[in-house]
Image: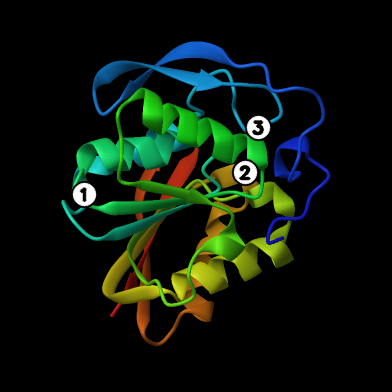
Amino acid sequence: MLFVSDNHYFASSPEGPLVTREITVNLNGNKTQVLTAGGIFSPEHIDQGTQVLLGHIEAANPTGTFLDIGCGWGPIALALALHSPKATIYAIDVNERSLELTKMNADKLGITNIIVCKPEDVPRDVLFDEIWSNPPIRVGKKVLHEILNLWINKLVKGGTARLVVQKNLGSDSLHKWLVEEFSPGFESTRIDSSKTFRVLKVSKL
């Protein structure tokens, strides 16, 4: 398991039965009905940080292999799949309920280009053109760094990772770590600051 936390939405199997409910969200400018449930991250709506990140969705390439780290019920992966239907999107999470809901929402929307799986089930030889993530900051700095180190190093040359992080949860210190950890060979920049959130971009040179 790559995410370790006391928070229930980082558990592999949340307690209690799966009871789905339908909510209306805006994905890529369109009102869309999706399914959510308790025991996952942000079940009531698209959280503010993810909304800030999705404001950059037009930058996603039309093709390639993408990764959504910590997919929850699927807002980032779904938005990427709708924007780039010829791309392949891996949506990963340790929470089995999140994976189930992402699969259900992809089916509900007729999306066929999302591969939903646990982190350890991503084939070792798969590399990514793009990573889009509202990463699990609350797992703690050590575990977060391990997660990002693993996946950012799987970018292809010219590939990019876009991460949204709240300022008061350490976006600036994470940016500093990204610069130090992935240098040389990568460029780490802050490309947006909105509603107390930062969007950080890591490019493999």
Q: Secondary structure at mark 3?
A: loop
Residue where numbered disc 1 is placed:
59
Q: Looking at the image, is mark 3 or mark 1 earlier in the sequence?
A: 3
Q: Is residue 164 left or right of residue 20?
A: left
Q: CA distance from mark 3 to mark 2?
A: 22 Å
- The three-letter code of the residue at mark 1 reads Ala
Structural crowding at the residue carrying mark 2, measured as other residues with C-alpha within 10 Å and reported as few (<14), some (14–19) or many (≥20): few
Q: Looking at the image, is mark 1 or mark 2 earlier in the sequence?
A: 1
Structural crowding at the residue carrying mark 1, measured as other residues with C-alpha within 10 Å and reported as few (<14), some (14–19) or many (≥20): few
- The three-letter code of the residue at mark 3 reads Ile
Q: Secondary structure at mark 2?
A: helix
Q: Nearer the viewer, mark 1 or mark 2?
A: 1
Residue where numbered disc 3 is placed:
40
- The front one of 95 and 129 is 95
Q: Looking at the image, is mark 3 or mark 2 earlier in the sequence?
A: 3
Q: Is residue 37 left or right of residue 89?
A: right
Q: Nearer the viewer, mark 3 or mark 2?
A: 3
Residue 41 visible somewhere in the drawing: yes
Q: Secondary structure at mark 1?
A: helix
Q: How many marks?
A: 3
Q: Which mark is residue 168?
A: 2
Q: Residue at x 30, y 54 (%)?
A: 88
- The three-letter code of the residue at mark 2 reads Asn
* Quadrant (top left, top right, bottom left, bottom right) of the N terminus: bottom right
Q: CA distance from mark 3 to mark 1?
A: 28 Å
- The front one of 61 and 56 is 61
Q: Position of residue 110 (x, y in %)?
A: 30, 29
